[in-house]
Image: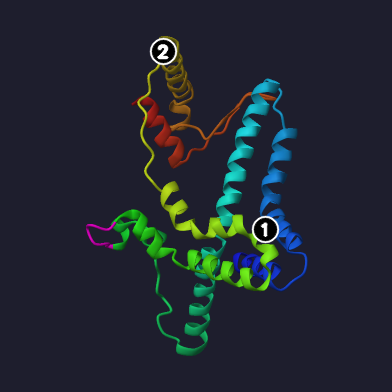
Amino acid sequence: LVPAGLTLLLLLGWTVLPHAWLWTLAVVAILLLPAASAFVLDLLRKPDEVLLRQHLAATASVAGRHVAQTVLTLAFLPYEASVNLDAIARTAWRMLVTHRRLLEWNPSANELPDRRHRNEPPGRSELAASVNSMWIAPVIATASAIQIGAAAPSALALAGPILILWFVAPGIAWWISRPLARREARLTRDQTFFLQSLARRTWAFFETVVGPDDHWLPPDNCQEHPVAAVAHRTSPTNMGLALLANL
């Protein structure tokens, strides 16, 4: 109910409630608070072995991704609200009234705006499929803009940027869902030597600790501090990594 509640709070703040800026700022603050908290924690938790400039650069990069996720969350609010409310209504109707189709299950992949998962016609583009899947967002944005312009024109300037995000939400979803272009790695001689040394050291770990004491199975972990100790147990993950190291 959170996306629906935030969407409703924005719409009411722009049309009915006084001080539209206050409600808009409240919703943005709610969405931004987790990112801000994570940024402060990351900033304060500087590892001793990391240089200050490297720590600040890494923290700024993570903060930028958090802000981008917040913008995406704000852009997809109406769509998320419609999907969640539809699920709630279907569940309540089937469990309380019809008692039918209680085991219906749609894998998340089937909800992607991609014709490969939706059996779209051959000539249909992924962008058109995204619009077809998320049409509710631009509809709500258009209707809201008309209502705000008629009821509270002064709030239109404040609501405008968010309404634009809602209107172009299908395009944003299509754009961020495009396959990433693969870049071919071009390693220097030093980088190649470093990777080969790292691979050799990784294999050497298993060469050292895998032996008859553990029936030639890799131990779960090796402790170096405060005293050296080997955990004489294993797991499928350890076995797989040992085989991969050998390979």
User: Which span of residues is magenta-colored?
Assistant: 119-124
- The percent coordinates of residue 178 (x first, y second) are 38, 46
- The percent coordinates of residue 216 (x first, y second) are 41, 30
- Distance Cα–Cα, label 2 vs label 1: 51 Å
Describe the element under mark 2 as helix, strand or loop: loop
Is any atom of residue 152 visible in this view? yes
Residue type pointed to by label 2: Thr
Residue at coordinates 47% horizontally, 41% vertically from top-left? 235
Quarter-of-image position of residue 78: bottom right
Q: Tag 2: Cα neighbours inside 10 Å, few (<14), some, or many (≥20)?
A: few
- Return the mark for residue 158: 1
Residue found at the far left of this picture:
122
**118 or 138: which is nearer to us?**
138
Describe the element under mark 1 as helix, strand or loop: helix
Is any atom of residue 107 visible in this view? no
User: Is residue 104 part of the magenta span, yes or no?
Assistant: no
Colouring method of the image: rainbow
Residue at coordinates 67% horizontally, 24% vertically from top-left? 227
Quarter-of-image position of residue 121: bottom left
- The percent coordinates of residue 39 (x first, y second) are 69, 40
Q: First in sequence, mark 2 or 1: give its number.
A: 1
Which residue in the protein does label 2 denote? 188
Residue found at the far bottom of this picture:
97
Q: Nearer the viewer, mark 2 or mark 1?
A: 1
- The percent coordinates of residue 147 (x first, y second) are 60, 72
